[in-house]
Image: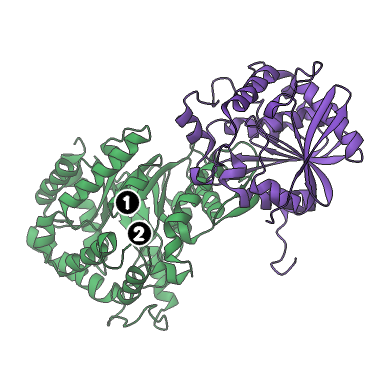
Chain colours: A purple, B green
Amino acid sequence: MTNIVFTEKEYAMKSGALRVNTGGSGRPLIHLHSAAGPRVSKVVQALADHHTVHAPVIPGFEGTHRHASISSMQDIADLIGEYITTHCNGECDVIGESFGGWIALWLAIRHPSLAGQLVLEAPAGLRPADKGGLPNDTQERLRALHANPENAPEEKRGEHILMTNRKAVAEYTAGVAFDEQMAGRLGEIKARTLVLMGSLDKIIPPESGQLLKQRIPQSHLTYIWDAAHALEFDQPKRVATLALDFLDRGESFLVKPAANVA
Amino acid sequence: MHFSFFHLMPWTDLEEAPTEWPARNGQFRGEKGTELYKRYIDTLAHAETCGFDWVGCNEHHFSPYSLMANCNVVGGALTQRTKNVKLAMLGNLLPLLNPVRVAEEYAMLDVMSGGRLIAGFVRGIPHEYIAYNVSPDESRGRMREALNIILKCWTEPEPFGWEGEFYQYRAISIWPRPHQTPHPRMLMSASNKESAAFVGQFPAMVGLTLIGDLDVARGLIDTYRASSMEHGRNPGPEDILVGQGTCIAETDEEAQETMAEALAYFHKVLMRPQQDAQRIVVQKTRFFGEGSGGAGAGEYFVKRLETLKQRSVKEQIEAGTILCGSPSSVVKQIKRLNQHLGAGHINMNMALGRMPQTAVIRSMELFRDRVLPEVRAL
């Protein structure tokens, strides 16, 4: 994994300005951040070794302005669709972390021609109401996010930014754990999809991954061993290896290549 | 209490102890092997008629000590030779094997037997790691990861992949799934505090074999219970199994004489070749954790084997490490184990070394007629 520099730029979209961090080279890939906001993890760095990674900041996160007409997860998916149309040649692969995975699912449902392949990391939005969820207690929340806390990113952002990020999540998701409308439309997804779940994830339960595997026609479900919810930080190498192999080889990623094949 | 009849399936025709490990196999004879397998499987099937709740077997490699490189093969035969007795595989040496294959074979045994499998998972004894060229240092990590894969194999409703430290699979969906739901009853062995605490992290019974001292065994059981409770389970006596070499005869003297001859062959001939390989693994690797070569669990393992080998039969009876004597003596010994350890299950190895088959059958039938009626209600 090389240390690729990401450049930040604002793009004028129909609904307002969209900040996007871009880095790397190769086939374009959209990276949709989690409820924690955008962070350049080792996984994002590894992806940028092989792809031009576009990492939009969802309006309202990191101190950016909300767009008046963007109020739901579907609206965010439409905004990302507009960005893919105008800046990614009209189609690209998408990877989404948790909250970002929820957006990616709506994108694939509402704009099937724009989403190439999907990688969903412990996607939110399909959590049975009586299972999982984010603990309120700070220490408990950290334990639920990180099975390997030594890999957790150092938090350099101020409390105000973190608070506005939380507010944006609450408003976009409207407190919904299980998006019934989305669940009913998963069968429409045409994109080949890889769902990654942490073997120790207590926030998004295995049932969410199982439902996606059951309903998305071309899908694969893989558990990442010794990872809690924050997959990209707990097991960056495992996540990057799997995501890159899937994005590169498509359905052939099921077959183990010979050891001497590059 | 519950009881199982356990068989190691030893080779009985060695006149001299092999001097190195692995023991040379030039003296193995196919006809004798076939005869032994038939006798041993007949004996295990007979155990069902003697009131045993389980019949058990296990896995060992490259040694006349046991002819069971894969106990699941024997388990497959037993599914067709028995009707109600539980079939305890005690167990597969998980860190050496492909966990998906273990999940599949155990599921087959469970379905073929109508849900009678007891699924045992063990790390094995140290030298087995040389046999299958797996680093002993990786033993605990492989065990933990493989157990989690097997539980997923048995319970996941959808095909799934696994990206781990030791194992990677892109798509798994075993057929058949086990007969028992959510999965077969599991058993894992514990020979030191670390492993006792580890077992408690899983929904599993604990099994203690080669007990050297009842107080140490009690400590391991306490550790297992505490760990289980930390993980939301409250194990009872039925979750604690203790392994015991067993010989029952009409008189104490007769039983002790038969046991002494059997143990002499077991320790001095069958166990001889693995000693050097075992020592290398214990001293040069972290099989028993950090510092296992000089202190702690590794040292305890080696000392325990030495102690067991050097004790007389009477000393072993006194120490609570074997059951041996007349039916009334064995009843007392079982009651003592039950009281001291809180164990609800005893795993009896009645075919030790080259104990004559007549003596084995006599032990089994005395157990059925004069021991079991006295201890069943404990």
Query: Image height check: is B173 above or below A14?
Result: below
The residue shown at (24%, 71%) is B267
Mark 1 falls on what kind of element?
helix
Mark 2 falls on what kind of element?
loop
Which one is nearer the viewer's eye here, B87 or B140? B140
Label 2 neighbourhood size at 10 Å, few (<14), some (14-19), many (20+)?
A: some
User: Left or right: where does residue A27 sit relative to residue A139?
Assistant: right
Question: Which quarter of the image is occupied by the C terminus of chain A?
Answer: bottom right
Circle 1 is placed at which residue position?
Answer: B194
Q: Which numbered circle lies on residue B35? A: none
Which one is nearer the viewer's eye here, B268 or B251? B268
Residue A108: image location, x then y, percent: 81, 32
Question: Which quarter of the image is occupied by the N terminus of chain A?
Answer: bottom right
Label 1 neighbourhood size at 10 Å, few (<14), some (14-19), many (20+)?
A: some
The amino acid marked with disc number 2 is Gly
Which one is nearer the viewer's eye here, B289 or B29? B289
Query: Can residue B124 be seen from the camera position used here?
Result: yes
Residue A157: image location, x then y, percent: 60, 33
Circle 2 is placed at which residue position?
Answer: B289
Query: Image height check: is A17 above or below B189?
Result: above
User: Of label 2 and label 1, which has the lower sequence position?
Assistant: 1
Are the residues at dot 2 and dot 1 in contact (C-beta closer than 8 Å)?
yes
User: Left or right: where does residue A181 sit relative to residue A81?
Assistant: left
